[in-house]
Amino acid sequence: MVMAVVTYAVSRLAGRGAKFMGTVGMNAMTRSMSFLTMCIGVQFVVNGVLDPELLRALRVGLSIR
């Protein structure tokens, strides 16, 4: 419920925030959020590759052949 209220408030104030930040501020914010999104995606991939169960299954599968 709290997240819904916070999301509503942020969405409601987004227009005013955009005017306050201006074009340069919006570009900076967009680049920062894009970088953070990319970092989260890379972390998902790293966590998937380094998953102990996946590595164990690969070792077992490779030793059978």
Image (spheres, grey):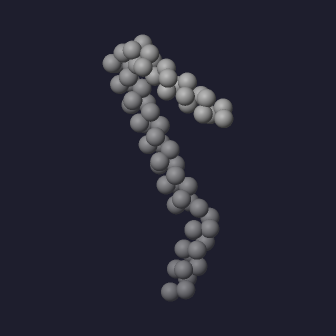
x 55%, y 24%: residue: 9
Q: Quadrant of the N terminus?
A: top right
Percent across and percent down for residue 16 are: 44, 16
Q: Quadrant of residue 63?
A: bottom right
Task: Please state the horizontal and vertical placement of residue 29, each as a whole percent of the image.
Answer: 42, 26
Where is residue 36 shown, x and y percent of the image?
A: 47, 37
Q: Residue furthest bottom?
A: 65
* Quarter where residue 53 is shown: bottom right
Answer above or below: position of 65 versus 6: below
Front in this rendered view, residue 6 or 45: 6
Q: Residue at x 35, y 25 (%)?
A: 27
Residue at horizontal 62 percent and vertical 34 percent from the top: 3
**Quadrant position of residue 6:** top right
x and y, in percent, of residue 41 in the image? 47, 48
Q: Which residue is painted at 39% across and 31% down in the image?
A: 31
Q: Is residue 21 visible?
A: no
Note whether 14 is above or below 7 in the view shown: above
Q: Furthest-top residue in view?
A: 20
Asked if one can make out residue 63 in the rendered structure from this viewpoint, the answer is yes
Instruction: Report the side of 49 relative to 52 (left or right).
Output: left
In this picture, is 20 found above or below 30?
above
